[in-house]
Amino acid sequence: MTDFYKYIYYRIYSWNYYLWKNQKMAAYNSTLGITFSVVALFFCIKIYAERLIETKIISFFDNVYTSIGFVGIIFLINYRLFEQNEKYLKIAEKYDSNKGNKTNWLINGFWAFFIALAPIFTYIFLL
């Protein structure tokens, strides 16, 4: 797993912690948020590919049950990566200690939120 994916999770987690003031709730909400972002990214790739080749692509998004299963699998992967054994605390400690200057931290945070939310907004736009 790349450090950038962890950083995106950290930024979502830090925002949720700021809102909720509860570490477990912030971690759970962050896992849900990054899960839906990844799923929206896969949906967008499918839609772009269908429009590019102008034909229907068979995928697991065509069936409701397989779509729910796909979301569940992505959630479980993210849960194991970030929440199991409270790994989010280690990630938060790592990035809290590496904040550097405030301008760089704000720019990186903007890009992390943009990358996390862009697939969701793109999917809504494509519908």
Image: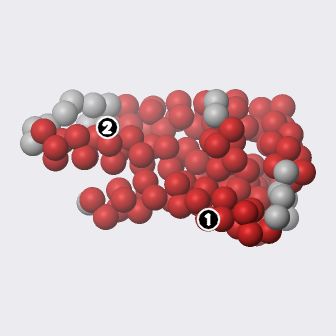
Which residue sits at x=45%, y=33%? 70
Q: Position of residue 111 (x, y in %)?
A: 58, 59
Quadrant in which the N terminus is drawn: top right
Q: Which amino acid type is marked by label 2?
A: Phe
Mark 1 and mark 2 lie on one chain; the one further toward the N terminus is: 2
Say the numbered circle drawn on residue 64: none
Q: Nearer the viewer, residue 60 or 12?
A: 12
* Real-space CA distance between mark 1 and mark 2, rounded to the nearest whole angstrom: 30 Å
- In the image, taking residue 100 as reference, residue 71 lies left or right, namely left
Q: Position of residue 102 (x, y in %)?
A: 80, 68
Question: Circle 2 sits in a helix, a strand or a loop, which is it?
Answer: loop
Question: Circle 1 sits in a helix, a strand or a loop, which is it?
Answer: helix
Q: Position of residue 19 (x, y in %)?
A: 76, 69
- In the image, taking residue 85 as reference, residue 53 lies left or right, namely left
Look at mark 1 in the image and give the residue it sits on: 110
The local crowd at label 1, few if under 14, some if 14 to 19, many if 20 or more residues have their Cα within 10 Å, is: some
